[in-house]
Image (cartoon, grey):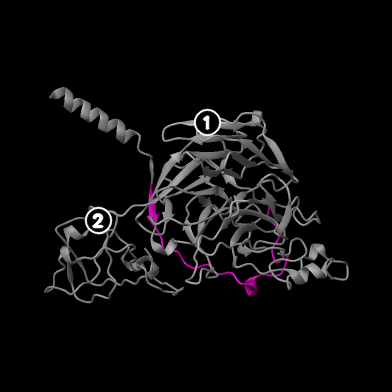
Amino acid sequence: MLIHIILFITTTCLALAKEAPIVPVQPFTPEPIRISLDDLPPPYKTTSAVKPAIVVGVPTNATLFVPDVNFRVTIYRDNMKSPRHMIYTPTGDILVTEMHGNRISILTDDDTTVFADGSNGIFQAFGMVFVKDWFYVANAGELRRYPYRIGDRKLSGTGQVLMTYGSTYHWTRSLILSPNGDRLFVTVGSGSNVDIEYPSRASVQIVDLDGRNNQTFAWGLRNPVGIDFHPKTGDLYVSVQERDELGDDLVPDYFTRIQNDEFYGWPFAYLSPKNIDPRRCFPNGSSERPDLVERTRTPDVLFQAHSATLGMHFYRGNQFPSYYQNGAFVAFHGSWNRDSGTGYKLAFVPFNDDNRPRGYYEEFLKGFLIDPKGPTTFGRPVGILEMKDGSLLFSEDGNGRLYRIEYVKSTVGRQFRITTVVTSVLTVRDDCQQTPPLVTFCQRMPPTENTYDHRRCRPLNREYTHKKYQQPVRRRRSSHITRSVQIQRQKQMNNEDDDDENDEFAV
């Protein structure tokens, strides 16, 4: 009997030891960030800063911020060589491109091995996709494919070069399969900041699976990296890094739907035909290409200038609250050309009932940026992968980590919130509270006398309290709240509609 107990304890301890390390998080209230063309300053309103990111080790007290106390962040992998893009293999393992390792690693539950490296012709690989009996990878200067059989753990040979493109300056190449599975879309960033180049640069290219019929799909996109099809409409969207050296707030990065033969301005104009880049003008002030200026499209959503958008993914799962379904998550790698650093976080672009962007974005996960004046950071998000269970995996190449974001509803000490103004003194039972330091409330149901019965509490997804009442409620027999004011910022979290953009309440 004693031996069985010892074995049980040992097994339990080993299982707990294998659990992913949990990252401390705190909730915050995301505010809609809407940037319009009217908000843009003139070129050179501020001097052009040169402030590359100062990446430091992860602080011992590092805390990340998420929009809901139910979001849990864990370290999925550590000590990787600048992890970038991630995809699933046909067998359910995860592939990760590692820039500084110049390799592609394959991750299983408890192991990491090399799937491909320089000996296979891998060079600054990013985009990857499996199609039938082939594995495609987008290197900095070329698209290759390799024979693949289900279950292969290592590529053999150097594959076949299907197409080539410039590899200077912006070299990150994303890759996605068309919805009908017969063509590939490849993002190709520009070879400069604002030089005139071949149309194949600063564009999204489309090519057959055998490398034939290469065409330009959309162009004038300075550095498109994030690319995905909307799960409901099938429309193709990209996230784009815009140009530098026009000032702190020019030019905003953006997120937009693209269609065949659309032009988005680079390098002659930005965001609108009204915004001509002064560096692409004749001495008399007229544009070098007024015909292309007139064709310049305005993107759907503008991001803070110099955020350096990279990975982008439409959320298709059902683990997160319904508010996030069919919206887009975007990774901001972080600035170098802004006096006060920005980026270094994950953002979310919500969509409306017509499956179109609402015109603004929100912060989703932040906290990596320690000092904007540096800018000093311990994380630079890059790629986003939706896992099989609906959680999100994202890479950051500053400290070589993969982080996992899960939405975990508590079953013990459930979380509640007040959604009405309570003016009388209420007794909040111990059963209805969370373990400190979290503050939890109950949604007001028809009262019984002057006491809240925990059995009448109805669980909700998110909680917000007025800033005046952010102090933790310590666990004791009873607590008295003389006034608690609560509103619900996003009723979509409970499958309702609310377009209020000026929420004055916060957690």
Dot 1 or dot 2, earlier in sequence: 1
Tag on residue 434?
A: 2
Q: Is residue 337 above or below residue 127?
A: below
Residue 39, located in which quarter of the rendered image?
bottom right
Quadrant of the image for the N terminus?
top left
Q: Which residues are magenta?
A: 24-50
Direction from residue 286 to residue 319 in the image, left or right:
left
Q: Residue at x 39, y 49 (%)?
A: 389
SS for callout 1: loop
Residue drawn 17% across and 67% down? 456
Instruction: Tell me how far mark 1 sits from mark 2, CA to CA.
Output: 46 Å
Q: Which amino acid type is shown beneath numbered disc 2?
A: Gln
Where, quadrant-wise, is the C terminus in this rendering?
Answer: bottom left
Q: Is residue 49 magenta?
A: yes
Name the element at disc 2. Answer: loop
Q: Position of residue 395 (x, y in %)?
A: 52, 45
In the displayed image of the protein, which residue is found farthest to the right?
A: 283
Of 341 and 449, the residue lying toward us:
449
Residue 378 visible in the current orientation: no
Asked if residue 5 shows in the view, the reply is yes
Q: Amino acid at mark 1?
A: Arg
Q: Where does label 1 land, which residue? A: 153
The answer to whether residue 74 is magenta is no
Residue 459, x across and y down, in percent? 26, 63
Horizontal side of 22 relative to 351 (left or right) equals left
Q: Is residue 165 left or right of residue 39?
A: right
> Is the residue under label 2 in contact with that under label 1 (CB below 8 Å)?
no
Residue 237, x across and y down, in percent: 59, 60
Q: Residues within 10 Å of mark 1 (few under 14, many from 20)?
A: some
